[in-house]
Image (tube, grey):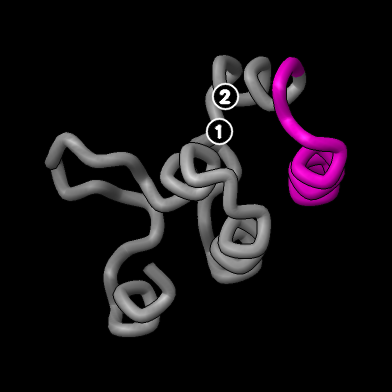
Amino acid sequence: MKYAISKGVNININCGMILNTSIQTCLNEKSNTLLEWILENGADRNLLTKNNLAIIDKYGTAELKELIKHFLS
């Protein structure tokens, strides 16, 4: 994903395909390191839906919750 983004793939869209945006993919893959990287490199925080945030709140690790809290503030 980092390679594609570095080559110009838009970090915030899925081009109409049945794919997740990069931010949702990171959440699905439980990759805090990649999530932090894409948030630092332009991922739109507004793409985190209330449903995403509720799932993070209920099931997320303390590290993930802190990461999301940091980037949403």
Position of residue 56 in the picture relative to residue 65 (left or right): left
50 lies left or right of 17:
right
The residue segment tinted magenta is 58-73
Amino acid on which the number 2 mark rests in the picture: Asn
**Amino acid type shown at disc 1:** Leu
Query: Viewed as shown, does residue 19 lie left or right of 68?
Result: left
Seen in the picture, residue 36 relative to 71 is either above or below; the reply is below
**Looking at the image, which residue sits at the far left?**
17
Q: Residue at x 50, y 49 (%)?
A: 26
- Tag 1–tag 2 contact (CB < 8 Å): yes
Q: Between residue 48 and residue 62, name the one nearer to us.
A: 62
- What residue lies at 29% left-to-right and 83% top-to-bottom? 7
In percent of width and height, residue 69 lies at 83, 40
On residue 34, the disc is none
Residue placed under numbered mark 1 in the picture: 48
Q: Whole-Å distance between the Cαs marked 1 and 2?
A: 6 Å
Q: Quadrant of residue 51?
A: top right
Magenta segment includes 5: no
Task: Find disc 2 in the rendering and name its residue.
Answer: 52
Magenta span: helix, strand or loop, mainly? helix
Q: Name which residue lies at 60% across and 56% down.
A: 35
In the displayed structure, 21 sits above or below 9; it is above
Q: Position of residue 47 (x, y in %)?
A: 49, 37
Residue 52, given in percent of the width and then of the height, sits at 57, 24
